[in-house]
Amino acid sequence: MPANGARARRDQIVHLATTTGLTSVAELSRTFGVTASTIRRDLAQLTADGRLARTYGGAMALVAHPEASLRQRTGEAFEAKRAIARWAASTIRTGETVLLDAGSTVGALAHELRTAEGLTVATTGLTALQELADVETVRVECLGGTLRPLSQSFLGPLAEAALERMTFDRVFLGADGVTAEHGICEADLSQTRLKELMARRADAVYVLAHPAKIGRRPFHTWVRLPPGWTLVTDDGADPHEIRALRAQGVEVTVAGGE
């Protein structure tokens, strides 16, 4: 295909990603009648140009409304999130008090804890509350605060004040992106402040992030975490990004892998 044809196809790929959300290589290959390798080259070029963000097996838009709602994100990378959640649940011991962030991967962890016994779970996320609301063997504490509809999370001064009254054995945080250079990327400053406070109140800090989040920086607000935190991902993560994180002293666990 001529160069101008490739440019037109790439423009259409950006349009589709912007209007329909997450776009897969297989879908794009069928839509444009080209090979998967051609689409991967298109996505690589669009990512290099800063027009798209690569995901595991596809791409998503960086323009229009870059922050997807929790409902939109729940079905993405389902198997990776489940593997991460299962590993995270295996670290929790009976009698512990744990803190769960909002987000779809942390919500998957809450689902895994439905069979737990003797736990206290505090959370800032509606998903975790819904998962554990009818579990009689888990004591649930809602930190409260101002509801942020897009992320289905509570934040603000009331949530921060509640954190000052508790400490935790472990905290499990979600992320919009994770990089070795900056830490956790989030959509706004109120989220970054709350995550930093959550991390300070726990003995052990875990960030749960499926591979599409690793190395991604969709926004311009960041969470700096204390030394010794653990990133939990799965084996689809970019090895270069994993090496860079480990070089910064981050413990990286690959669920179901190394």
Image (cartoon, rainbow, N blue to C red):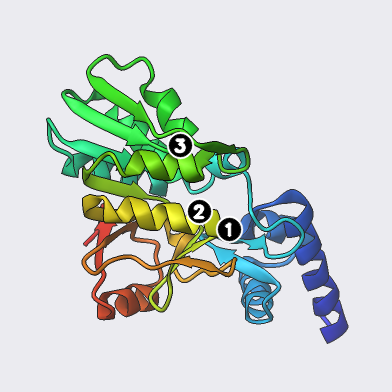
Residue at (74%, 64%) from the top-left corner? 63
Residue 11 picture location, percent across and down: 82, 70
Q: Mark 3 Cα within 10 Å, few/some/many (few <14, many 20+)?
A: many
Name which quarter of the figure residue 165 lies in.
Answer: top left
Residue at (37%, 79%) from the top-left corner? 240
Amino acid on which disc 3 is placed: Gly
Q: Which quadrant is the N terminus positioned in?
A: bottom right
Viewer-closest of 15 and 174: 174
Residue occupied by mark 3: 125
CB-based contact (under 8 Å), mark 1 and mark 2: yes
Amino acid on which disc 1 is placed: Asp
- Which mark is on residue 191? 2
Q: Secondary structure at mark 1?
A: loop
Q: How many marks?
A: 3
Residue at (45%, 24%) from the top-left corner? 130
Viewer-closest of 134 and 153: 153
Residue occupied by mark 1: 188
Amino acid on which disc 2 is placed: Gln
Residue 198 picture location, percent across and down: 34, 50
